[in-house]
C-alpha cells in the first residue's frame, strides 16, 4: 500500500500565507493522474511547523476529502512533544488518513531510549499504521538501526522514511527488521540506488514537480531494471540537488509557482527563493522536462 513514488506534498499558499484550496485540489488530481503512489500531507515539505493545530487538522481533513479513497493519504503528525504527537496522531486517525509519518523529535535531542519510548507511546495508543521519519540533518537526533529494530516489533510500526542519504542504512535496517518492514528513501539524490538495492520507494520532494517521471523511476528501480531506472533518473538529477539550494520547501514552492501550479505564498520564517537561485532551479526544471 505504501510503496513507490510518494510525494512529500507542498501546502499551497496565497501571498498572505492562507492555504489555497483550489491549488490543493488541482495538485492532488495531478498526482493521481500521474501515478503517484501516496500523498504525504503536512510534513516537512508541507510546512507543518507553521500550521496551527486546528489548521493542520482541517488541512488533513481536506486532503482526505479530495483524495476520496483514490490514493492513500499519509499524515505528518510528529513533533518534539510526545503528548502533542499523540494528540495530533489520534485526531488524524479519526479523520480517515491511511497512515501517519512521525518525525524524530527535534531540538530537544532525546537519547535512543527516549526515542524508543516516544514512538512506543504512539504505537500503543493509536492503531493507525506508523512510518518513522529519520532526518538527522533537521532533527539533530539520529534514530539508529538498533532502535528501529526495537520499534519494528510493534505491528503498526510498518516502516521508515530514512533521509540520511546513507545507503548502508538500508542494508542494516533490512537485516535487523526483515523484508516486510518498509524502507523508504527520504533523499531524492540517492533514491534510485536505494530502490535498486531493495528499498520500497521514495517520499519525494522532486515528485512535486515531476510526478510522472518519479512514478516511472520508482517502478523501474523497484523491479530491478537498472538501465531504465538510471535513464529516467539522469535528467532528474539536477532537480534532486537544486531543489535544496535553500531550505526545503523554499525552492520547490518557487518551482511550482514558476510552473503555474500554485501561488507564491510561503510562511515565515521561510522566505521566497533568493533571486540568485532562480536561474539554476529553472534550468533544472527545463532539464527534467517540467518547464519549457
Image: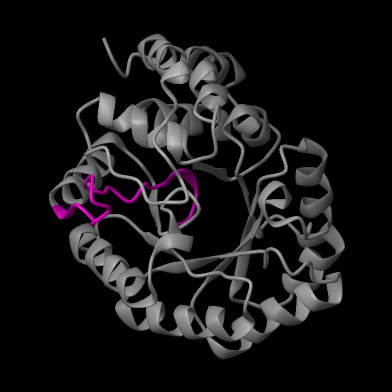
Identified at 79% across, 57% down, the residue is 142
Above or below: residue 134 compared with residue 241: below
Above or below: residue 176 compared with residue 151: above
Percent position of residue 214, x then y: 43, 30
In the picture, measured across the screen, residue 173 lies left or right of residue 230, that is: right
Percent position of residue 159, x then y: 62, 60
Q: Magenta residues: mostly which secondary structure? A: loop
Asked if residue 126 can be seen in this view, the reply is: yes
In which quadrant is the C terminus drawn? top left
| Circle count | 0
Percent position of residue 176, x then y: 83, 59
Q: Which residue occupies the foreground of this view, 129 or 18? A: 18
Asked if residue 233 can be seen in this view, the reply is: no
The part of the chain drawn in magenta is 1-21
Q: Residue furthest bottom?
A: 125
Identified at 49% across, 40% down, the residue is 204
In the picture, measured across the screen, residue 247 lies left or right of residue 183, that is: left
In which quadrant is the N terminus drawn? bottom left
Identified at 21% across, 47% down, the residue is 14
Q: Which residue occupies the foreground of this view, 100 or 142? A: 142
Percent position of residue 232, x then y: 48, 17
Q: Which residue occupies the foreground of this view, 111 or 70? A: 111
Amino acid at each position: 500500500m505504501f510503496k513507490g513514488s510518494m510525494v512529500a506534498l507542498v501546502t499551497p499558499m496565497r501571498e498572505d500565507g492562507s492555504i489555497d484550496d483550489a491549488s490543493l485540489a488541482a495538485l492532488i488530481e495531478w498526482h493521481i493522474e500521474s501515478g503517484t503512489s501516496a500523498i504525504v500531507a503536512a510534513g516537512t515539505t508541507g510546512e507543518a511547523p507553521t500550521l496551527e493545530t486546528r489548521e493542520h487538522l482541517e488541512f488533513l481533513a481536506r486532503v482526505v476529502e479530495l483524495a476520496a479513497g483514490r490514493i492513500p493519504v499519509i499524515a505528518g503528525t510528529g513533533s518534539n512533544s510526545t503528548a502533542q504527537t499523540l494528540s495530533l496522531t489520534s485526531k488524524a486517525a479519526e479523520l480517515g488518513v491511511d497512515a501517519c509519518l512521525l518525525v524524530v523529535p527535534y531540538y530537544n535531542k532525546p537519547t535512543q531510549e527516549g526515542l524508543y519510548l516516544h514512538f512506543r507511546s504512539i504505537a500503543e495508543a493509536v492503531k493507525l499504521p506508523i512510518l518513522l521519519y529519520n532526518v538527522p540533518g533537521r532533527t539533530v537526533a539520529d534514530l539508529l538501526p538498533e532502535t528501529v529494530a526495537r520499534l519494528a516489533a510493534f505491528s503498526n510500526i510498518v516502516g521508515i522514511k530514512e533521509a540520511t542519504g546513507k545507503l548502508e542504512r538500508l542494508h542494516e535496517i533490512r537485516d535487523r527488521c526483515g523484508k516486510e518492514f518498509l524502507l523508504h528513501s527520504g533523499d531524492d539524490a540517492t533514491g534510485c540506488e536505494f530502490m535498486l538495492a531493495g528499498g520500497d520507494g521514495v517520499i519525494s520532494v522532486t515528485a512535486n514537480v515531476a510526478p510522472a517521471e518519479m512514478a516511472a523511476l520508482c517502478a523501474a528501480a523497484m523491479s530491478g531494471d537498472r538501465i531504465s531506472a538510471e535513464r529516467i533518473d539522469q535528467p532528474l538529477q539536477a532537480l534532486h540537488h537544486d531543489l535544496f539550494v535553500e531550505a526545503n520547501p523554499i525552492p520547490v514552492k518557487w518551482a511550482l509557482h514558476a510552473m503555474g501550479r500554485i501561488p507564491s505564498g510561503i510562511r515565515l520564517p521561510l522566505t521566497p527563493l533568493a533571486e540568485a537561485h532562480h536561474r539554476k532551479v529553472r534550468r533544472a526544471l527545463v532539464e527534467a522536462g517540467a518547464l519549457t
